[in-house]
Amino acid sequence: MHREKRLPKYRKIIDFIKGKISTGEWPIGSKIPSQRDLAQSFEVNRSTVIAALEELTADGLIEGKLGMGTVVVNNTWTLLATTPPPDWSEYVRSGLHKPSMTAVQEINKREFQADLIQLSKGELSPDMFPVDAMKQVMEQVTRNLSGFGYEEPRGYLPLRQAVSDYVGRQGITASPSSVLIVSGALQALQLISVGLLHRGSTVFLEQPSYLNSLHVFQSAGMELAGLPMDRQGMIAQAIYARRKQEHGAILYTNPCFHNPTGILMTEKRRLELLRVCEEERLPIIEDDIYRELWTKEPPPLPLKARDKHGHVLYIGSLSKTLTPGLRIGWVVGPEPVIERLADIKMQTDYGVSSLSQRVAEEWLASGLYEEHMHKVREQLVTRRASAIRALTKHMSELATWEVPAGGFFIWLKMNGKLSMMELFTAAKRQGILLNPGNIYGETQEGYVRLSYGYSSIADLESGIERLGQIVRDLR
């Protein structure tokens, strides 16, 4: 310990990087953190970092490569051995699942930095986490706990019954055998992509769409085809023209407080979309994870509630409304489809945590979930009002926006020409993390998705004020 304190600062950086390389945590081909990140981590200036990297380069361990940054090119064992170890970077590049966009990877890393104002994060603030109620639920679950192991393929039966009752209150008729418990909505999409769709087929979706920031369908060999939106939601009539051009297999929609635009699909548009998809024999994935986040009045009934022919796969989750930490979501659909997805899920992970499922069942069955959502809606109203006031004060001449009827996203359209990646980088330097619109689709340059759900109200207001100044400076 005393020796570590006496070490020059640049030596600490050298020892850290050598340690990562020698233990195999950073194998050959790995990109090391940027000079900026290393300087922040070790609380030193850039010149100290550069001195460390120059010594490691001289030792033959790292090398700067054009377009790649600084990468590991050797380890201490390799320098002595006649037969080098495998180049793991080749395997990493060859995997079937495509990597996230660079900006998305950067956002995912930075969303856990406490020193950043999180205007990007798509989840509720820790301030809204119901600690006392969760303790109460946990105590109730442990009081009745007996031995448990793997659950049946579709999930814990009492939870499936609770979900059946819950979606029944939304107008959806579904027995527990038509319900599959999954580890959040994203796993539902992954199971659908590998279990139900043909390679080379097309997934129709809103343009912009959350799915454009992921590669869950593309990694399974699908093509994404965007359909235009207006203030009523996805334009159903556009399906006819696109259906003739492309081999469409399925339609994905996020009708309630759409991510990223915040748009709520109207009752009229829902009926029209369902009619067109039935005519075109185009199955629907209805991703309804934001439904409960309404602030004035409940949204129209789900598409699934109008589905009389098993046309719609319905996805729900507790991640956006209670906590993502439980990793609990569900899929409601025709029994043969649920059975197929359940089989793939068992092959993948042998089921969601039994304990999480019991906790989720207690939340849904006890009535505590409805009580919690009432409090969440009240706080979202306050947060949205604070965000709109700050935007009006600091950005009314810089951007335009619609006030969402629920959810926690505001879709900002910046006035004039401005690179969103430049704005993203400049905001990050100023301690603000936000989501540039182009991660939701190639045509979304000039937009920013702003979340008012996570940061404290003080940080939210401060962040918007600083964002306005950053935009002015860039111009």
Image: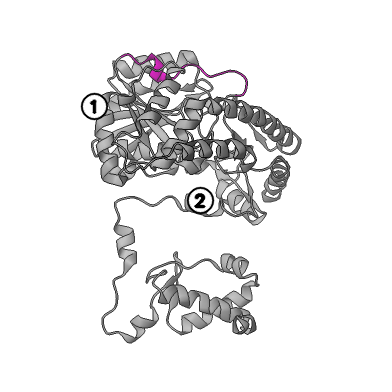
Give the CA distance from mark 1 to mark 2: 36 Å
Q: Which residues are magenta?
A: 295-308
The amino acid on which the numbered mark 1 sits, given as a three-letter code, is Pro
The one of 312 and 336 positioned closer to us in this rendering = 336
Residue 271 seen in this snapshot: yes
- Does 162 sit above or below residue 82? above
Residue at the outermost right position: 393
Relative side of 42 to 81, left or right:
right
Question: Which label sits on residue 108?
Answer: 2
Question: Which label sits on residue 336?
Answer: 1
Instruction: Give the class, few, some or many, for how many residues have Cα within 10 Å of label 2's Cα (few <14, many ≥20).
Output: few
Q: Quadrant of residue 448?
A: top right
Instruction: Give the class, few, some or many, for how many residues have Cα within 10 Å of label 1's Cα (few <14, many ≥20).
Output: few
Residue at the outermost bottom position: 80
Q: Residue at x 52, y 54 (%)?
A: 109
The amino acid on which the numbered mark 2 sits, given as a three-letter code, is Asn
Is 434 within the magenta?
Answer: no
Q: Quadrant of residue 60?
A: bottom left
